Amino acid sequence: MTAPIRIALAGAGAFGQKHLDALKQIHGVEVVSLISRDLDKTRETAAKYGIGHATTELDEALARDDVDAVILCTPTQLHAKQALACLDAGKHVQVEIPLCDVLAEGEAVVRRQRETGLVAMCGHTRRFNPSHQWVRRRIEAGGFNIQQMDVQTYFFRRTNTNALGQARSWTDHLLWHHAAHTVDLFAWQCGSPVVRANALQGPIHPTLGIAMDMSLQLQAANGAICTLSLSFNNEGPLGTFFRYIGDTGTYIARYDDLVTGRDETVDVSRVAVSMNGIELQDREFIAAIREGREPEAGVAQVLPCYQVLDGLERQLRGG
């Protein structure tokens, strides 16, 4: 029998629990340690999922011999530093999106991954959603070419709370977190790097200190364009909606679901072994560890996205 891959998961909030639910569906995986900032709540969640070790300290989990790999669902500002700590400890690591909010820190993770040879992956979930995979397969088969992507990323977050309505210890960011999904997806689906990018942002929130509304324009080297609207002021519907406008059709992706421009359902149930993009993302992480290969959305693959975001941030600061 193949030995189980033993996982430590850091960050037991809303998204961390999505990963815990996904990992339960994957054969040969055992979550052995749970790390989060509130010990009582961490122990409660660990008991719910049958995890034997709970702590508030990542270093404590990294020192354990029974941890092979780590999934980081922690605040954005910690991602790169904690990913480096995992690699330094000899652990494979999957860090949730974004890889970083400072380009130099993301570049450091890529260098360390190359030095260690360990699996280091970033949670660019859109590469794994069955809806986007279906579109990609059609592109790869030569039956569809993107002319334009129109994307809306809308939430209602005028207070510092997470998806469960709970208070956050950190502040989310439209550019470095939510735009990262689309910037990476656009270049990946086009098979062509982003060569032009422009950004506008609305007023800075007086308490949160971030722009609550933002608009991005992108162009790939092959000529395709993308328009992305982002808001934390939108009262509904919530989520991200991707419109693919191509030479042979129009498709609208809503997370794991896909419809045509005429709102006809596209059956994506046979695209992969699951309809859950998070589960498929975690399956790729585990498979890459077992097979000793670079995963889809490996840190080097997604770094160009963060180079674009860095340029946009500098543009916004200067303008």
Image (cartoon, rainbow, N blue to C red):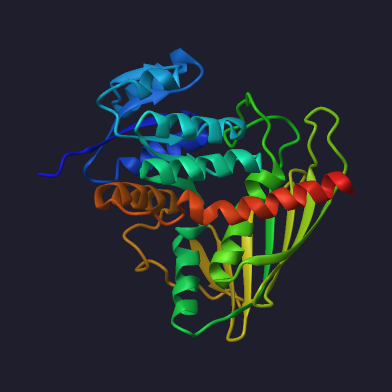
Residue 14 coordinates in the image, percent (x, y): 51, 34
* Of the pair 161 and 199, the residue shown nearer to us: 199
At horizontal 57% and vertical 33% (from top left) the residue drawn is 164
Residue pushed farthest left?
Answer: 1
- Residue 51 left/right relative to 12: left
Q: Quadrant of the N terminus?
A: top left
- Is residue 114 positioned above or below 62 on the image? below
- Residue 146 left/right relative to 28: right
Instruction: Report the number of discs.
Output: 0
Residue pushed farthest front?
Answer: 115
Camera sees residue 236? no
Q: Identify the image quadrant of residue 79.
A: top right
Q: Identify the image quadrant of residue 25.
A: top left
* Of the pair 268 and 31, the residue shown nearer to us: 31
At horizontal 63% and vertical 41% (from top left) the residue drawn is 104
* Of the pair 145 and 254, the residue shown nearer to us: 145
- Is residue 196 positioned above or below 42 on the image? below
* Of the pair 116 and 30, the residue shown nearer to us: 116
Camera sees residue 294? yes
Residue 188 coordinates in the image, percent (x, y): 54, 65
At horizontal 35% and vertical 57% (from top left) the residue drawn is 274
Residue 35 coordinates in the image, percent (x, y): 43, 23
At horizontal 60% and vertical 27% (from top left) the residue drawn is 166
Residue 154 coordinates in the image, percent (x, y): 69, 50
Q: Identify the image quadrant of residue 71.
A: top left
